[in-house]
Amino acid sequence: LERSVVIVADQVRWTWASLLLWDLAIKGGSATRLLPVSVNDDAIDKDFLAVCTCFEPASALQPAAPLQQAAAERAPMGFSRLHGDAELFRKKWVEKRTASGMERVSFARSMQQQMLALLTNIGYDPADGTLPCAP
């Protein structure tokens, strides 16, 4: 990552993004906002884009290990558990095609609620969409 890079990630409240959001929140050198967007999806009608601007040099931001491995090693259990749950469901839905549409709807809604609770616990402010950033 270089200074002034902008990262945009979509559907961050019910996908593997639990580790991305945790990594952005604990890593200094960036500012992140979660912006609500309408989605045309049977499971959910609203999700969020994460928009992150990096303002530190690359050497300060690049993890030594891949993001998922590095973030999982230091993320609180709730974030790691959500990541694991999302990966298991992704395999069931995408790779094996064994999940029903109703299971997907239920899973997506549950993930959104759990992610909101975890983000709120680390200082996320739903009113303005600001994700906290470590100094």
Image (cartoon, grey):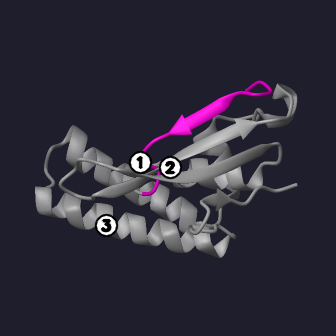
Q: Position of residue 112 (x, y in %)?
A: 40, 65
Dot 2 alpha-carbon crowd within 10 angstroms: few under 14, some 14 to 19, many 20 or more: many
Question: Of the numbered discs in the image, which one, if any, rests on residue 109?
Answer: 3
**Front in this rendered view, residue 128 or 134:** 128
As drawn, is 77 to the left or to the right of 113? right
* 101 shown above or below 59: below
Q: Are marks 2 and 3 in contact (CB under 8 Å)?
A: no
Question: Could you tell me the amino acid type at mark 1?
Answer: Gln
As drawn, is 52 to the left or to the right of 79? right
Question: Could you tell me the amino acid type at mark 3?
Answer: Arg
Q: Are marks 1 and 2 in contact (CB under 8 Å)?
A: yes
Q: Secondary structure at mark 1?
A: loop
Q: Position of residue 121 (x, y in %)?
A: 64, 75
Q: Position of residue 77 (x, y in %)?
A: 59, 68
Q: Is residue 39 magenta?
A: no
Q: Quadrant of residue 105?
A: bottom left
Quadrant where the N terminus sits is top right
Question: Could you tell me the amino acid type at mark 2?
Answer: Ala
Q: CA distance from mark 1 to mark 2?
A: 8 Å
Q: Main secondary structure of the magenta part?
A: loop
- The first of marks 1 and 2 along the sequence is 1
Dot 1 alpha-carbon crowd within 10 angstroms: few under 14, some 14 to 19, many 20 or more: some
Residue of label 1: 11
- The first of marks 1 and 3 along the sequence is 1
Question: Of the numbered discs in the image, which one, if any, rests on residue 117?
Answer: none
**Front in this rendered view, residue 65 or 101:** 101
Between circles 1 and 2, the one closer to the viewer is: 1
Q: Position of residue 30 (x, y in %)?
A: 76, 43
Please report the bounds of the magenta region as a residue range.
1-13
**Front in this rendered view, residue 92 or 14:** 14
Quadrant where the C terminus sits is bottom right
